[in-house]
Amino acid sequence: MKQKQYFINIYILIPLIFTGISIIGIILTCQLSSYAARHANVSSFGLVVLISVIGALTFLVSLLIVRNLLKPIMQFIEKTQKAPIFGARIAENKKHIFDNVKQIEKVFDNVANILTLVEARELFPNVIGSSPAMRNIFKQITKVAPTDSTVLIYGESGTGKELIAQSIYEQSARVDKPFIKINCVAIPEGLLESELFGHEKGSFTGAIARKKGKFELADSGTIFLDEIGDMPMATQAKLLRVLQEKEFERVGGNVPISVDVRFIAATNKDLPKLIKKGKFREDLYFRLNVFSILLPPLRDRREDIPLLANFFLNEQSKSVTLSPGVLQLLIGYAWPGNIRELRNVIEQASVLVEKDIIEPHHLPDVITGQPTNMNICSNSNDINLDEKLEIMEREMIIQALKKSGGIQVKAAEILKINQRSLWHRIKKYHIEIDDVKNLQ
């Protein structure tokens, strides 16, 4: 016969245990007082001894209960501290770990941080970035993707807005439905409505047959409207109707067509400014701006530059690496063209390189030229020397791990530092050994 099991929530169990201990203590105290009142010959020393014994027993019982309840947590803390990814100094700190609540909190913070990075790699394998700015973007995506809310992605040209839209779609409930992309600025104004809504045969010159528009093709799925800030005002009015009523007519038609579409839009324009200038509808803006994501420019996520550069290098036919001088220049440059510009620079340098190392003279003059560097140094968004050194140190560790095949002992020898120091730096810079191996 299978024995029944009963489970009690820990938030109820612990208060019950200590309430029980308190009640037992009160009962014993009452019994002791009653006994002393009935026996006038009881010595005060005997009472002190008895009270001490009761107190000691209560303390030991409480300690045993707390120890059993917290044992799994303590084991988790100890195992986590021994993991190389969380750094060294285990021997020095081990005796203080369980006495220091802040140390335990720090361990849990580190674990949460690592899990966030792992989640980002699993959920967004095509988005390269581990900087705090990008981790914040990943959190926003995971929150909004499962919903049907309209998303408006802001970001400078070349920051990867389409990739973020793709990630939202891939994490949504409509992932097995159509994902239709349309660039509002790439299609001539006279043809945009036909592309979006379709047209009937004979509705205009050249309309030799009925054509379904993007909205019909995206029915039950997701549509991505890129560069929506450049959409003509007349088309904006018709788009607003689709957002509000979920229906439209084809160009030249009069039969309403109902659709169930999730909207994602993107722009590099300041839409509130366009509204003031009369170039964008305010009502459409509020319909689109249900959930907004501000994608940071590359200059605000410089920690990701080495990672992105290596990713683009691996796409090239040649097997090349970056010299420390090139890495410093890439980190110091403002990147007005963002990730798209970085990709082009890496591709150009890979073509020009004679051997297997990209040197500064392989880079465009706009990156290496003295006037440009002077302008960059005067830019308020530029990073300071300590931040540059940290980014370069992180990249040197990654390169050493790549050369050693992820073996940390060999990587430490290449860097001429002890293994414990390497572990500490791997923890500090959140370097994932498996990711480094995959970059080989």
Image (cartoon, rainbow, N blue to C red):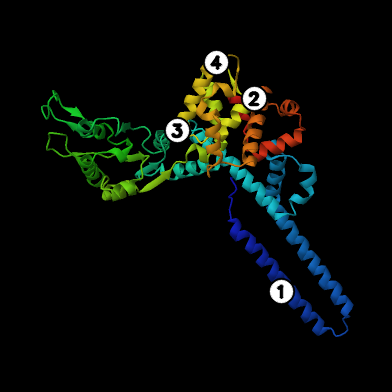
Whether residue 118 can be seen here: no
Q: Assess disc 2: are there few (<14), some (14-19) or many (≥20) residues with their C-alpha within 10 Å of its C-alpha.
A: many
Q: Secondary structure at mark 2?
A: helix
- Disc 4 target residue: 318
- Disc 3 target residue: 337
Q: Is residue 13 left or right of residue 41?
A: left
Asked if disc 1 and disc 2 are in contact, CB closer than 8 Å, the reply is: no
C-alpha distance separating marks 1 and 2: 66 Å
- Disc 1 target residue: 26
| Residue closest to the eye, 361 or 211 | 361
Asked if disc 2 and disc 4 are in contact, CB closer than 8 Å, the reply is: no
Q: Secondary structure at mark 4?
A: loop
C-alpha distance separating marks 2 and 3: 29 Å
**Which badge, 4 or 3, is on the more N-terminal residue?**
4
C-alpha distance separating marks 4 and 1: 80 Å
Whether residue 377 can be seen here: yes
